[in-house]
Amino acid sequence: MTFDLRPWRRLLAVWLPAIALCVVAAALFLWQSSESGGRRAQVRSRIEELEREIARLEGLRTATSGDRARIEELDRQFAILHGEVFQSLEERLTDILRAVGSATRDAGLLPGNFAYTAAEDRGTGFIRFGIQFSVEGQYRQIRQMLAALQESPEFFLVEGISLAGEEAPVSQQLRISVRLATFFVDADPEQLRRLTGGIGGAGGEG
């Protein structure tokens, strides 16, 4: 039995492109659905990329959460320093003088006259308040006094200690001048004038 292919040949321009299109479509479908290429592989690659980005963002979130907690703790500590430690001259002066008197008295020392200085501090914006006085006693007593001042709940800086008498005394008694400093967030100008004669320039003591 023979087939007449002449009609197919005459319609070759019609059915051949249709067959080619079907073949291309089938090949494209197989490529898109394959494991190693096509749309499925693109989707998988995109998912992996997004998962890596999510992991990176999670790491950043964890790091920033830790930074935020540290910043909040620093803010809390600064608020305590500002509101409870430094405060104002009016709120702290009595406690400061009481702390100095207690440190000297417990060490068996009698401080001489007090002198005060005040200056605006550029670095903090606070008022730097200086206290100077002299004491006379043995080395052990002076060391005890200084330790008590440093352990005081009042914020003190021991700025300097200098001999106020002979550099080579014949006895064990020492007479020294002590300079302390502290900071206030605020001070009444009239009270400062009564204590110091006024406030000095920024960064130094008046």
Image (cartoon, rainbow, N blue to C red):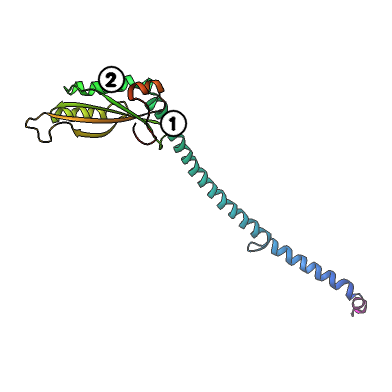
- Amino acid bearing label 2: Arg
- Amino acid bearing label 1: Arg
- State the image quarter where residue 99 is shown: top left
Which SS class for mark 2?
helix
Eye-nearest disc, 2 or 1: 2
Residue at the image point whose x is 42% and y is 33% from the top = 125
The front one of 127 and 64 is 127
Q: Which stretch is magenta? A: 1-10
**Left or right side of 197 for 174:** left
Where residue 3 appears, as percent x and y from the top left, is: 90, 78
**Left or right side of 194 for 21:** right
Distance from label 2 to label 1 (Cα)?
A: 28 Å
Residue 16 in the magenta stretch? The answer is: no
Where residue 35 appears, as percent x and y from the top left, is: 64, 61
Mark 2 or mark 1: which comes first in sequence? 1
Where residue 55 appears, as percent x and y from the top left, is: 53, 49
Q: Which residue is mark 1?
A: 76
Q: Which residue is mark 2?
A: 98
Residue at the image point whose x is 51% and y is 46% from the top = 60
Residue at the image point whose x is 9% and y is 30% from the top = 172
**Left or right side of 162 for 67:** right
Q: Quadrant of the N terminus?
A: bottom right
Q: Residues within 10 Å of mark 1 (few under 14, many from 20)?
A: few
**Left or right side of 19 for 39:** left
The front one of 85 and 167 is 167
Residue 4 in the magenta stretch? The answer is: yes
